[in-house]
Amino acid sequence: MTRHRLLRWTAGLAATGLALAALVLWLNLRGEAPLAPDPNPPAVADAATMARGAYLARAGNCAGCHTARGGAPYAGGRGIATPFGTVMAGNLTPDVSGLGGWTAAQFRRALWHGRSADGRLLVPAFPYTHFTQVTRADADALWAYLRSLPPVAQANAPHALRWPYGSQAALAVWRALFFRPVAGASAAAPAGADARLLRGAYLVNGLGHCSACHGSRNVLGGSGALGGEGGGSTLPGQRWQAPSLTDPQQLAMGQRSAAELVQLLQTGLSDRAAVMGPMADVVADSTQHLHTDDLQAMVAYLQSLAPPATPAPAQPPREARVMDRGRQLYADHCVACHGAQGQGAPGIYPALARNPAVTLPDPANLVQAITGGGFPPGTAGNPRPYGMPAFDLPHDDLAALATWLRASWGHDAAAVTPVQVLLAR
Amino acid sequence: MRRALALAGALLATPAIAADTPLAVPDTLAQRLQPCMACHGAQGRASRDGYLPRIAGKPAGYLYQQLLHFRDGRRQNATMARLLAQQTDAYLREMAGYFAALDLPHAAPTPSPAPTALLARGQVLAQQGDAARQLPACSACHGTRFTGVQPALPGLLGLPRDYLIGQLGAWQTGQRHAQAPDCMAQIAKRLTPDDIGAVAAWLAAQPVPPAAQADATAPGPVPLRCGSTDHPPP
């Protein structure tokens, strides 16, 4: 009798396991056409296609990950920190150690379905979850451009991921949970949708893969949506936070001037903000190279996602002692460049009044900016940036200065404690 | 200016404060390069009491190559890498030219606490080298006065002892690289820890001569091929 029950349980478990495995397998293969010899191989690319491919590579900032510091462009070798270990970006140049042996169809399958040429699953640090939206024509133009790069012999280094995250089985389960391929089709366009918004959505959600940093991720690294409240994430291996682009309590893009946001993406500096940290890399390597109408489309799309502003709950009064200290520190260290009213100097030093980095719920970026200083990225629009010295102030002083900044000029953001400073610097 | 005024108008509640509004920011490299001064001293004149090197007056070619090395990972310093990560070659060249053109007096060195025998050994290495160990004199490349040679060989005087030790050590361990062939790496790897201590102590204790600009030409035939002078970046 007992043996009978054990058998029944074993059979049941085995059947369930098989069914789950079949489900994962099916979820991994759905929407994926067999990789037959390409019936319609892209013709030898003309100069215009090549130029478009180069532009699209900028829009996707491929070189941002696939170039080691000081290394040959697109030759890979850069380690990307993730919560699961380090992912090593591969060589994209047409050498045999890179994409030399690949076909256009294999490249397209990598973008759309996250598979390597040999069919193995790629890790989702390569944002195929976004690139699955890249159109066939754009995928082929990118391929044509990558084929035109000078081949660089540089073998790909293995990832250093903790078990089991890098295993094919774990990747298959992850994909079953979090990946839905669309193979070049963008999300269904609502009838009568504005062409500019569609273009913006295509760039932001496809090649731009903005939500890879600016969306929230769950504990398994599944990417959340870009829109709505909340969102944003602290970048692995970094002290910087990528704020939500839509939350009215964070960057509040819906409430900002579109022209200013375009200027920020184009030059790295606007009257109200300077990009620093990882976003400075994005502006320098990607967005400064995009056409103004594409940037306008991206900004329009992002602004369309933003919910209307909701008044934040008023903060309790700050300690007078802390505010006095903060005011004094501002007068000693900051006022010469940022002005008595936090007004900055247009085109030179960003304003701090109504600068979103000052009032983000998480003060990490404000603390990073003060303690590290630095230059905005050097761009065609701002080739010789004015820099900010690092101010290595004690925790208490930094907390007081940040608290004062977050309560001045109409700001009403939560006070910053010395412990928050300690964790953020 | 008009934009600044308009902005001020929008922001300021009282006209009394508006008077102090638009900020006058000088359009100078000294102003643009404020982050450098925070560590390298006002006008890049760091004294030899700390660790960080003085950059004012070093040859422009040398400074430009170091900026490229820091940005591109051939020299390791997290602060320098972060500051330079997204700056263009053209701006780095301009930064190098700015600091190279500064001609500012040096303070007299404080007397070295190092033993006389150590300083004497350092002096021999610096001025004569050690032929038996294939060690050229520092002066063979860096100039008989140790004030460097244009355009890419830095002067060795007026620098902190700890900085000099740190650099020779970094070359030994592969933390610092120069353009290949990396002659300083070859030399540093032939030095013992005692050699490094001696030569750094002696160099750091020397006064900087009044006209401390780098020499225009090398003192003689170079003992080793060096990428930094043979193949400078374009």
Image (cartoon, coloured by chain):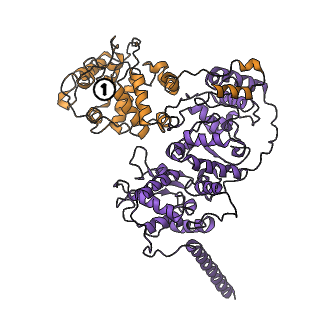
Can residue A239 be seen in this snapshot? no
Q: Is residue A422 left or right of residue A78?
A: right
Residue A383 appears at what percent x and percent y?
49, 34
Is B194 above or below relative to A213? Answer: above
Q: Quadrant of residue B66?
A: top left
Taking depth in this image into account, of A192 and B190 the one nearest to the observer is A192
- Quadrant of the snapshot with the N terminus of chain A: bottom right
Residue B201 appears at what percent x and percent y?
35, 21
- Quadrant of the snapshot with the C terminus of chain A: top right
Labels in figure, total: 1
Q: Colour of chain B?
A: orange
- Taking the spot 53% from the left edge, 65% from the top edge, the residue there is A112
Is A140 above or below relative to A344? Answer: below
Taking depth in this image into account, of A65 and B50 the one nearest to the observer is A65
Chain letter, disc 1 residue = B
Taking depth in this image into account, of A92 and A53 the one nearest to the observer is A53
- Tell me the amino acid under the disc marked 1: Pro
Residue B50 appears at what percent x and percent y?
46, 22
Can residue A406 be seen in this snapshot? yes
- Taking the spot 64% from the left edge, 41% from the top edge, the residue there is A259
Residue B132 appears at what percent x and percent y?
17, 30
- Taking the spot 69% from the left edge, 18% from the top edge, the residue there is B20
What residue does disc 1 label? B151
Give the SS element for disc 1.
Answer: loop
Q: Is residue A255 left or right of residue A56?
A: right
Is A232 above or below relative to A339? Answer: below
Q: Which chain is purple?
A: A
- Taking the spot 41% from the left edge, 20% from the top edge, the residue there is B56
Neighbour class for label 1 at 10 Å: few (<14), some, many (≥20)? some
Is B163 above or below relative to A88? Answer: above
